[in-house]
Image: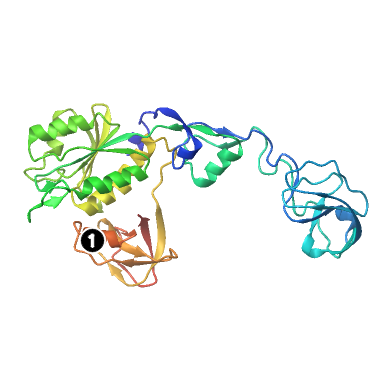
């Protein structure tokens, strides 16, 4: 699948203001407009002086505050009172913290033996002018927003969000605002996928529910290919009324795979038709959620311009014994402790058990080749 995703088209770009840039994908490199810091600065309140004169008594010959320039300099046994962030005067090569001196009038005494450079942030220590600080394809997190503001970028070029069509299928599925009969289910998959697509950097486009009718399903699938990517939920199993693969085949789809060795989510279809990629996700809610996270999310992120999509897998310690039947990698609802160290499986009734999924904040990942784990064993997890 990763090989196929390498062929995704380059997203278009757009210019936006910094207030709208959070979580967007950078479409241009960002370079330092000057040295950072542009001059050597003190990182403590204290006294700037020569380290070779320490310890001893010094004459205070001036003061430098943050936010002001200064032509002051220090000579032998002289000190200048300095504030955090203020430029270090010429002649000084260290700052003694104010807590480490005693003062009488214009004289200070200290027993410290500072090293040269101590409590000084040298010019260009953080970045040199012209250095590339951010590269295109990175997510604009809040520290990166701060960096863009630091280098004077009030506007930035980002990749436009891709449109992702979401198509639920099945006569048993009804819109959430409609009355529901005992044999029907509300269309939760479209809304969970919309949330997952949004988090991955896409704009979800919710299509009407495709009924178990060939013509209706084909009409909506063809409409879905007007977006950058099509996500289908349901209709990809081997049932009599599972029409999705038949329709896709008839419009000339190329199928890269139609089954994966995971549970929930085995009947997963990935392919390309009409110049666009598509995922046929299984219809049970857990299957839809898991297969999007494990497979489809990377496609949305690449379409959004993210340079290196990644799967948020980690490790945690089981709080209780766990067993499963080997042969498939299983993604099961679980509760991760607030500190992120321990994981507890959640009892559930299978892939349609949305209440249990809502109680979870992670998936326990049971390796296909292992049958059992004891309490205290480490096990893989997929973060929600």
Find the residue positioned furthest to the right: 76
Q: x, y (%) of residue 254?
A: 22, 31
Q: Count all numbered tags in the image, as a single digit.
A: 1
Q: Name which quarter of the figure residue 367 lies in.
A: bottom left
Front residue of 164/311: it is 164
Residue 377 visible? The answer is yes
Q: Name which quarter of the figure residue 235 lies in.
A: top left
Seen at 37% across and 34% down, the residue is 161
Front residue of 285/20: it is 20
Q: Is residue 289 above or below residue 3?
A: below
| Quarter that holds the C terminus | bottom left
Q: x, y (%) of residue 196?
A: 32, 46
| Quarter that holds the N terminus | top left
Front residue of 264/79: it is 79
For label 1, count other residues whose C-alpha is less than 10 Å away and answer few (under 14), some (14-19) or many (20+): few
Q: As drawn, is 186 to the left or to the right of 139?
A: left
Q: As drawn, is 49 to the left or to the right of 166?
A: right
Front residue of 44/60: it is 60
Find the residue positioned furthest to the front: 105
Seen at 30% across and 66% down, the residue is 345
Q: x, y (%) of residue 2?
A: 35, 39
Q: Name which quarter of the figure residue 286 lies in.
A: bottom left
Q: Is residue 122 above or below residue 160?
A: below
Q: As drawn, is 227 to the left or to the right of 89?
A: left
Q: x, y (%) of residue 154?
A: 54, 34
Q: As drawn, is 61 to the left or to the right of 270?
A: right
Seen at 32% across and 48% down, the residue is 293
Residue 260 visible? The answer is no
**Element at label 1:** helix
Which residue matches tag 1? 355
């Amino acid at each position: 699948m990763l090989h196929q995703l390498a062929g995704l088209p380059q997203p278009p770009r757009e210019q936006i203001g910094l207030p709208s840039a959070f979580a967007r994908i950078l479409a241009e490199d960002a370079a330092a407009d000057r040295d950072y810091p542009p001059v050597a600065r003190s990182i403590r309140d204290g006294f700037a002086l020569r380290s070779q004169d320490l310890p001893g008594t010094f004459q205070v010959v001036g003061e430098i505050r943050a936010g002001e320039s200064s032509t002051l300099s220090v000579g032998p046994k002289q000190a200048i009172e300095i504030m955090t962030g203020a430029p270090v005067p010429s002649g000084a090569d260290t700052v003694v913290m104010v807590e480490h001196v005693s003062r009488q009038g214009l004289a200070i005494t200290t027993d410290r033996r500072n090293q040269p450079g101590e409590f000084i942030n040298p010019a260009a220590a953080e970045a040199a002018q012209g250095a590339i600080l951010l590269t295109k394809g990175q997510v604009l997190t809040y520290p990166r927003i701060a960096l863009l503001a630091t280098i004077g970028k009030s506007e930035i070029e980002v990749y436009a969000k891709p449109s992702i069509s979401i198509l639920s299928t099945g006569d048993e599925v009804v819109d959430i605002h409609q009355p529901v009969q005992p044999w029907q289910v509300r269309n939760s998959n479209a809304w969970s996928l919309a949330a997952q697509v949004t988090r991955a950097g896409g704009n979800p486009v919710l299509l009407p529910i495709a009924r178990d009718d060939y013509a209706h399903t084909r009409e909506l699938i063809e409409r879905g290919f007007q977006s950058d990517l099509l996500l289908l939920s349901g209709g990809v199993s081997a049932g009599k009324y599972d029409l999705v693969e038949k329709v896709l085949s008839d419009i000339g789809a190329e199928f890269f795979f139609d089954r994966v060795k995971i549970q929930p989510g085995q009947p997963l279809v990935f392919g390309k038709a009409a110049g666009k990629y598509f995922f046929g996700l299984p219809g049970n809610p857990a299957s839809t959620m898991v297969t999007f996270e494990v497979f489809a999310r990377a496609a949305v992120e690449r379409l959004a311009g993210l340079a290196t999509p990644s799967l948020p897998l980690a490790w945690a310690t089981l709080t209780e014994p766990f067993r499963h039947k080997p042969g498939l990698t299983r993604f099961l609802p679980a509760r991760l402790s607030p500190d992120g160290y321990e994981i507890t499986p959640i009892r559930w009734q299978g892939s349609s058990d949305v209440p249990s999924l809502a109680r979870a904040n992670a998936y326990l990942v049971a390796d296909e080749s292992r049958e059992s784990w004891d309490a205290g064993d480490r096990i893989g997890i997929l973060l929600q």
